Amino acid sequence: MHIRTLTTLASGAAFALALLPPLPASAVSPPPGSPPTALVDALSRDLGISRDAARNRLLAQDTAEAIARTLPAQVREQSPGSWLDDTTGRLMVAVTDTAGAAQVAASGATPVTVSRGRAELQRLRTEVARLATGIPGVTGWGIDPISDTVTVRIAAAADDHATEQFAKDIIRLGNGVRITHVADRLTPQGGDVRPGGRWLPGAEANCSIGFPATDATGGRHFLTAGHCTNDPNQPAWGSSGQQDRIGTSNVGGTHSVFGREGDMGVVNVTEPTWQLSPSVNTYGGPAVDVTGSTEPLVNQAVCHSGVASGWQCGKVTAIDQTVVYTVATIEGVSFTTACSIAGDSGGAWLAGTKAVGLHSGGQSSCSPGGARDQSTFQPINEPLRKWGLTLQTRPGHSDTQAPTTPAAVRVTAVTATTATLTWDASTDNTAVTGYQIYTGDTLAATSTTTSTTVTGLAPGASYTVTVKAVDAAGNTSRASTPITITTSTGDTARTFTNSTSTPIRDYQTSRSTITSTAPGNTITPITVAITADHTCVEDLDITLTSPAGRSYPLHSYGGTTCHLLTGTTSHTVSTTETARGTWTLSIHDGGPGDTGTLHRWSLTL
């Protein structure tokens, strides 16, 4: 039996039945050049921003997504995760050491130093999953790379003893796990039969079509939600009901998943009257043609299309999460602020013009721009890989033409550690989405405008700088004519040291200060070198506080087996703020029966 009591997230666009007869020319999105009007208008409406801000957001995230694909495998394996800066659109990547930070910066992203790596967060997530088994108030959990924690969701109305005890057990895991209370439990979404872009599994209620795809033999299919396809070899009907067959759902019982692995399924399109179409239905606006697929990122702007809620948008709030529906526990889903209604299940989610997911569940209400975690989707690339399918995209929309070369690169300002550059804009047959700025062979910065400031340069050093333009399809221009910049000598005495010994005592916080006289802003990253010994490093929280009062965690409490802290450890902090003033190192010992001493520490600004 299909489950039809679950609710879907709706904030994107369901394919006008990725298999409807060909659309008239008037229904196809306007010629390429900038993000499609339907995306810009819907994001402006649902995120409450101007149309220009929505357009710039889409262009910036295209550049960030391209950089994400170039990150070294070692960084991806060790990093707790990546996200988009909600203001600038830059790609932020969590790292735990200076080597990772350097690799991230060289790729054109911004490194953010955190204390817990992927392995530690995955260990905590496994422990949470063990403790959460059978607890009625738990609605899900997952890694949050921005806070460098595992976030556990508990229903606000839960007041049973088991949930209360679970919350106490979570607190004992330390500050690597945090609890957030949510108003409602999400549900996978089915719903009443409605007119529009829908498909029917057998005689059951409607679902929404996701993305059309083909297999290696040319067989035609479309992807949708697994809870819409859980019955094997079930007839799949079009919007007109049982006189309008599309094909067969879950052929052989091997093409549907609704459980730990995800929420995804395949419908075989067998009837010759149905044609695959990659044009997403935006319910009143021009269709959006799919140009490829991408992975979800936190703060990524997304839209979805579904038969119940139509065309809705929002942004991604979390990825790779576990959600506990009343009927199943699903891993690997993404949460969004986009709204949805029962019947949207299986519908198409877009990030720009790229497929990003299949609608899974939600709160079954629709208030665009409302609650933080209104709807969830299954990332699209997983079912494509699992069943060996190729996403259908609009024929003739492939773009292989590179932008023109940026011209007249020039320096407008230079300091000991930075250089501000500007250049003449490039042109392209579709749209220039950004620029890459190189110092030698190293990608030093990216920009969505025709100027940028390169940071992290060495005082009194010379660099050869070039600029390349990038378009929406990832084509890169030739490098500009190189120019040479030389940073000023500046004040190179930017390392400050405190050599006064300070004891580290049980359940107390030891503090040591350094007063910096360095002018201007800090370099990035700041380097902190700590020489100390302690009998249980797992008991320590170590924090750096700037003159402006901003705190940066260098090491966090956690672990069941004690290890010695000895010698000198080095930490980096990726930030830029005023260097002059008093900086404070705080070491809190949160456990009993241990001894230690802070011998000295230094700060390179």
Image: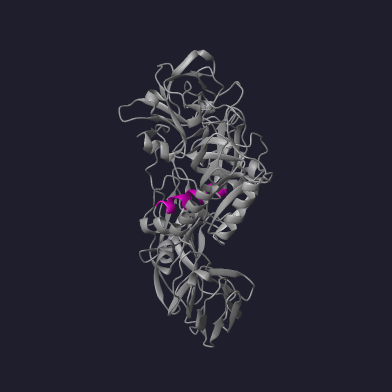
User: Residue 246: image x %, image y %?
Assistant: 45, 19
The answer to whether residue 436 of the structure is visible from this angle is: no
Q: Quadrant of residue 458?
A: bottom left
Q: How many marks?
A: 0
Of all residues, the one furthest to the top in this rendering is 243
Q: Quadrant of residue 580?
A: bottom right
For the residue pair 44 and 147, the one nearer the viewer reads as 147
Q: Which residues are the magenta region? A: 56-69
Q: Is residue 539 magenta?
A: no
Of all residues, the one furthest to the bottom in this rendering is 500
Of all residues, the one furthest to the left in this rendering is 217
For the point 51% across and 61% down, the residue is 451
The colour scheme is one colour
For the residue pair 503 and 261, the one nearer the viewer reads as 503
Q: Quadrant of residue 480?
A: bottom left
In the rendered view, would you say 121 is above or below 518? above
Residue 567 shown left or right of residue 159 in the figure: left
In the rendered view, would you say 265 is above or below 515? above
The answer to whether residue 294 of the structure is visible from this angle is: yes
Q: Main secondary structure of the magenta part?
A: helix
User: Residue 47: image x %, image y %?
Assistant: 64, 45
User: Residue 558: image x %, image y %?
Assistant: 51, 64
